[in-house]
Amino acid sequence: MKLIDNNLYIGFDIGASSVKWGYGNCQQGLLCFESVIISDKTLSGFQNLFADIINKVDSKIGLTGIKGIGIGTPGTIERKSGKLLGVNPNLQFWTEISPAILIDEKLNLPVVYDNDANLMCLGEASLLEPDLDVVGITIGSGIGSGYVRGGKVFHGSHGFGMELGHITVVADGEPCNCGRKGCLEAYASIEGIKSRAKRQLKYSDALAWNLHDILHNAKDDQRLQGFIQEGERLLAKSLANLCVVLDPDVILLGGGGTEGGLYSLERMENIFSESLPGINRSNTSIRCASLGNKAGVLGAIVLAEREIV
Ligand SMILES: [Zn+2]
């Protein structure tokens, strides 16, 4: 047990199949980063997983220097109740609950939490100039989005702001997981493209594909290639619309879809730029996020350090 600092925070980033975690602080960044597969998708399984991780931190550096814990989670968090709303198809039990329930109260450590895309954006923004307006987009099984202004995450009045994945991009279009039709997520996310491939192109195994399978199959199938291009175009157009509304300095693209090359950054930049009014064109840039899958954990640490006094 070696205490390397007395001002550290533990960050968690809950994904569909794994929990990423680490510790660090704003000044030193991430001092440790690991990922654990979720083997038991129940609440008690989750609590045990988190307890195991905290025990691991204890055995590595001790808990005396840990000042608090930040958690990033998929899903929408209602501001008033602090609870997750809506059902996550990958983690069905994970709803109507406060994420703080994952941390044993006996540890007596303050816990803060936020949506995972918000914390990806916060983590990435913490590496840029502090006064920049930053939008973060995760392209993965869904489309996540966050907005950080003056170092703070924007939530809207009720906690439901920045749900870019669920803006309507096609009137009465493809069905979305949220129960509505024509959402951006139904066209531009990995799950959306798989779902279209199954429904419209009759690939019976499409829902089991990974990103590599999508790209591989699209080489020989113009219609599937067309779905990818449509997703790319609708996403770039949506980012231009968001830019007209928010006027941010930078839009950062992250998530497994970005890293796996689902879309071309160059083509997206062109569509984005062509879709913008002239005054926005030279002021907002689109870039790839720099932290990869570590952004959410760093964002959870940054949130904890900034919120916990
Ligand atoms: Zn939707």
Image: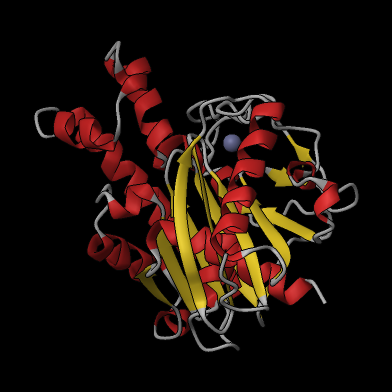
Residue located at (55% from left, 78% from top): 126
Please tell me which residue lies in front, 76 or 234.
Answer: 76
Taking the image as shown, residue 71 lies to the left or right of residue 238, namely right
Quadrant assignment, res 113: bottom right
In the rendered image, is residue 146 in sight? no
Figure check: 303 above or below 128: above
> Looking at the image, which residue sits at the far front?
1
Figure check: 41 above or below 81: above
Taking the image as shown, residue 241 lies to the left or right of residue 79, namely left
Taking the image as shown, residue 294 lies to the left or right of residue 61, namely left
Please tell me which residue lies in front, 76 or 10.
Answer: 10
In the rendered image, is residue 122 in sight? yes
Please tell me which residue lies in front, 275 or 2.
Answer: 2
Q: Quick check: which quadrant has ligand 1?
A: top right
Residue located at (27% from left, 15% from top): 203
Figure check: 265 above or below 183: below
Residue located at (59% from left, 43% from top): 166
Q: Position of residue 119 (x, y in %)?
A: 60, 61
Q: Position of residue 19 (x, y in %)?
A: 53, 44
Quadrant assignment, res 49: top right
